[in-house]
Image (spheres, rainbow, N blue to C red):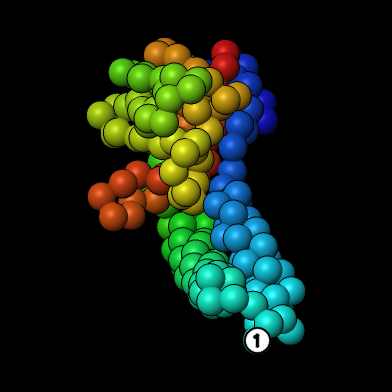
Amino acid sequence: MIKEKGGVWVMNKILYEVTFEWHSMYYGAGIIFVIALIFFLYHRKKRFDLDTKMQVIWFFSGLIAVGALIAQIIMGVSAVKDYQQVVAAYEEGNYKTVVGEVENFCPMPYAGHGEESFEIKGIYFSYSDFIIQQGYHNAKSHGGVISADGQLLKIGYVEKNNENIIVYIEEITQ
């Protein structure tokens, strides 16, 4: 997007807009469910021919399959709820914006399971590749778009549970 601002042409580049994301953790529960279910069904026909140890394993594989299915349903419901609250707020225009330079940028190490954080005009943002969350959460070390102090950005965010969830990032260059 190119705009004239006081005789100076300013070019803005949209770096991020929130969308619903299906996280890899959901696949983990699904894989556990499938493996346990296969084991359970494979040994179902043979359960009366199995020794006591195998019957216990057969029983617990069924229990694990049911538990993994329940966990996947709970995570799915939670994801939809987050989607409704965060993404819908963005789509309806119910979010705040701040424009300014990135300050106090603290990148997440490539191998670390920490958070990356920064401020713009005193508004604090933090996120991580390793936390399941709606909104922007891609650290610089893994190709994220927020890279250093001084970067001029327009950030759209939704306040939720005392956190500022980033729903929009626009880079402003002159």
Asked whether residue 44 appears in the rendered view, the answer is: no
Q: Residue at x 59, y 37 (%)?
A: 16
Q: How many marks?
A: 1
- Viewer-nearest residue: 56 or 120: 56
Image coordinates for residue 45, horizontal then vertical, percent? 74, 84
Q: Residue at x 68, y 82 (%)?
A: 49
**Relative vertical location of residue 112 with respect to residue 133 in this rendering, above or below:** above
**Relative vertical location of residue 137 with respect to residue 133 in this rendering, above or below:** above
- Viewer-nearest residue: 80 or 96: 80
Asked whether residue 94 appears in the rendered view, the answer is: yes
Asked whether, in this view, residue 108 is left or right of residue 49, the answer is left
Image coordinates for residue 122, horizontal then vertical, percent? 25, 29
- Viewer-nearest residue: 17 or 77: 77
Q: Residue at x 63, y 27 (%)?
A: 13
**Relative vertical location of residue 130 with respect to residue 152 in this rendering, above or below:** below
Q: Residue at x 65, y 86 (%)?
A: 48
**Relative vertical location of residue 42 with respect to residue 16 in this rendering, above or below:** below
Q: Disc 1 designates what residue?
A: 48
Q: Secondary structure at mark 1?
A: loop
